Image: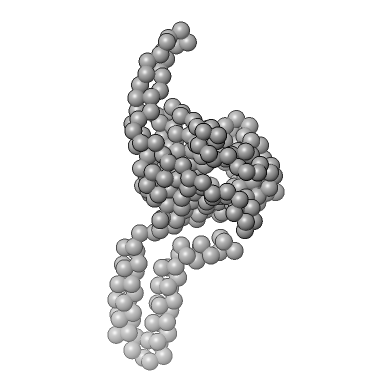
Amino acid sequence: MKRIFYFLKTYFIDIVVSIVGAVGALYAWNYGQQEVTSLTVIFITLLFVIYLRSRAKNFVFSALTWRKDKEPWAGHGVFQFARVQRSFEITSADPGYIHSSILTWSDYKLSFDFKIAKYGIGVLVRAVNLANYVMLQITEKGIRPHIRINGGWKIWEDTETGLTFDNLLKIGEWYKCEVYCDKDTITIKLFSGKAKIFERFWNIPIGSLVFKFKKDENDVGTDISFPITLEYGSIGFREYGDEKTYVKNVLVEKL
C-alpha cells in the first residue's frame, strides 16, 4: 500500500494533467467546439503544469521491496533484494550506499523499517559523498554516533552520548526508525509496532576534528585537522564486514 500511495503522490502532476486533457477532449467532442476548447484546455493545462513543476519535490520514497528499487542508490558492497524478507539485505557494504537524488538536501526527516540480523545497522545522514557523512550505528544496546571526514573516523560510544536503550533491541524483529536532521541537531526515534520505545537527540560537533596521519607503521604520525562541513547531504546505510540488516520503506521528507 505504501508503494501505491507514494507512486500516486510522485506522479500526481502527470495524473492530473491526463485527467484534465481527457475531460477537455470529451467536452470538445460533445459540444462540437473542438478547436477553441482544445486550445483553451492546452493553455490551462500548460499553466497548471508549469506551476506544479516549479514547486520543488519535498519527499523521496524507496520501498526496497523490488529488485529495481536499487537503481537510485550508489555505493559498494552487498545491497540487494532479499526475496524471503521482502526487503533489501545490507552486509559487507563499506563505505556504504547513499541515495543519489537528494545530495543537496539539508534539513529533513528520514524514516525506514529495519530488522537486525547481526550486530546492527549504520544509518547515514548528511552524506556529502561516501567519504564524508554522519553515521548513527544502531546496535542492540544503543546508538554509536560516527563522523567520517575524508575517510577518517571519529566515534562516540552510546554511553558517552546518553544514547543507550532502556531495553535491548531484539535480533530478527522489525522496528521503525525516524531520524530528524534539523541544523546541527539530530533527533532519533525508534518504534516497535506503534509504540515509541526510544527518543533522544545528538548534536553534530562544530569546528574541526584532528586525525593522525602515518606514512608507515614506524611513523609516529602527524596530526591533521579537518573542518566539519556536514550542513547538507544524502541518506544511506553502511554495514562493515559480516554485519547484516534488512531495510524497507525508506522515506525522506523535507522539514
Q: Tell me where residue 41 appears, x and y as whole percent.
A: 33, 79
Residue located farthest toward the top when viewing the structure as drawn: 218
Question: Which is nearer the eye, 212 or 44?
Answer: 212
Name the residue rendered at 62%, 43% in the picture: 166
Q: Tell me where residue 61 appears, x and y as whole percent.
A: 50, 55
Name the residue rendered at 42%, 10% in the picture: 220
Q: Is residue 90 visible?
A: no
Tell me the colour scheme of the image: one colour
Question: Which is nearer the eye, 204 or 236?
Answer: 204
| Number of dots carrying numbers | 0
Name the residue rendered at 57%, 61% in the picture: 2
Q: Tell me where residue 145 appears, x and y as whole percent.
A: 50, 36
Name the residue rendered at 62%, 38% in the picture: 141
3 left or right, relative to 51: right
Q: Quadrant of residue 139?
A: top right
Question: Which is nearer the eye, 205 or 12?
Answer: 205
180 left or right, relative to 55: right
Question: Which is nearer the eye, 166 or 78?
Answer: 166
- Looking at the rendered image, the quarter that the C terminus falls into is bottom left
Q: Tell me where residue 171 appears, x and y as whole percent.
A: 69, 42
200 left or right, relative to 83: left
Q: Quadrant of residue 52?
A: bottom left
Q: Where 13 falls versus 67 (above or below)? A: below
Q: Where 157 falls versus 103 (above or below)? A: above
- Looking at the rendered image, the quarter that the N terminus falls into is bottom right
Q: Is residue 147 visible?
A: yes
